[in-house]
Amino acid sequence: MATPPVHLHLIAYSEATLATITQAGPGWLVLDNLANPRPDWYEYWPIREHLLRAEREGALDEAAFYGFFSPKFTAKTGLDHAAVSRFVTTHAEHADALLFSPQPDMGAFFLNVFEQGETFDAGLIEAYGRFLEHLGRPVPLRQLVMDARQVVFSNYFVARPAFWREWLKLNEAMFEICEGEHDNPALQSLKQVLTVPTNYGGGAQRKVFLMERAASLLLATQPQWTSVPHDPFGFGWSTARFRAFPQEAFISDALKRAWRDTRWPEYMQAFVGVRERFMATGAKAA
């Protein structure tokens, strides 16, 4: 089987980040967002613009893999361009998406990325649940089980165009609601809960963190997609107290993986027992 092309981009938000990218080593492509016209959308704006333009121009190679990362990617994962490319090509034959998510404790100790997000932004699950119901595709977000094969933080994944299209379709539906001026009171209310300011980055809106969870939702609910995660436990861990319990993090992810593969209730019972030791007092950032 021929080795597929791998196109890996780092997003340049400013001259300073552009300089960082040029020093990041060979291979990286620059995703130019120097004008940064919509900082409220963080990574979504430049990724969106790139994908929409590439679709209009017919520039996407269906056999290739594409990734779009923040300039902090190597600092958070320890991976350079060569390491990412090597991992992608090694597993390309068996995957639609390759995952490189840091903060493995945040992925392991929570049932899914939505429960993790809810811990730091109360109301996130209800807001996204309302959005999915609006689309006619309700999902029991509080019951979803995700292991490292579905956990994606910070859009740190590489995928074929087919997966990126589904990701864009889901996020564009949210973009339309957040950007629209709605006469319908229900849509006005939905827009309001999707754009609630959070404590991150001086008030980053909830939509940013929901957008970052779209890939996880697709991988957890659409069985046509296959993913291969890079071992996340060698990446940067969070600043929360969970990082002090690496063995329990390994066990928690393994139990969730076993449950997803077998649906044996004993695995989920064991996972709940492990995590209850750390969830009782809530997550506290350092």
Image (cartoon, grey):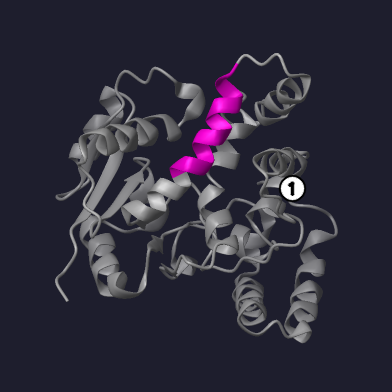
- For the N terminus, the quadrant is bottom left
What residue appears at the point 45 percent right and 49 percent down from the top-left corner? Answer: 166
Q: Residue lying at the far front in this picture: please name it.
A: 136
Q: Which secondary structure, mark 1?
A: helix
What residue appears at the point 37 percent right and 64 percent down from the top-left corner? Answer: 96
Could you classify mark 1 by the number of other residues whose Cα lies within 10 Å: few (under 14), some (14-19), or many (20 or more)? some
* Residue 203 location (% of width, % of height): 62, 24
The rendered magenta stretch, by its main secondary structure, is classed as helix
Q: Quadrant of residue 38?
A: top left
What residue appears at the point 71 percent right and 24 percent down from the top-left corner? Answer: 187
Number of residue marks: 1
**On the rendered structure, is 192 left or right of 181?**
right
* Residue 31 location (% of width, % of height): 26, 35
Q: Nearer the viewer, residue 175 or 197?
A: 175
* Residue range of the region highlighted in magenta in the rendering: 168-180
Is residue 155 visible from the viewing direction of this image? no
The amino acid at mark 1 is Thr
* Residue 107 location (% of width, % of height): 60, 61
Q: Say above or below: 281 vs 123.
A: below
Q: Which residue is mark 1?
A: 119
Residue 86 part of the magenta-drawn span: no
What residue appears at the point 74 percent right and 47 percent down from the top-left corner? Answer: 119
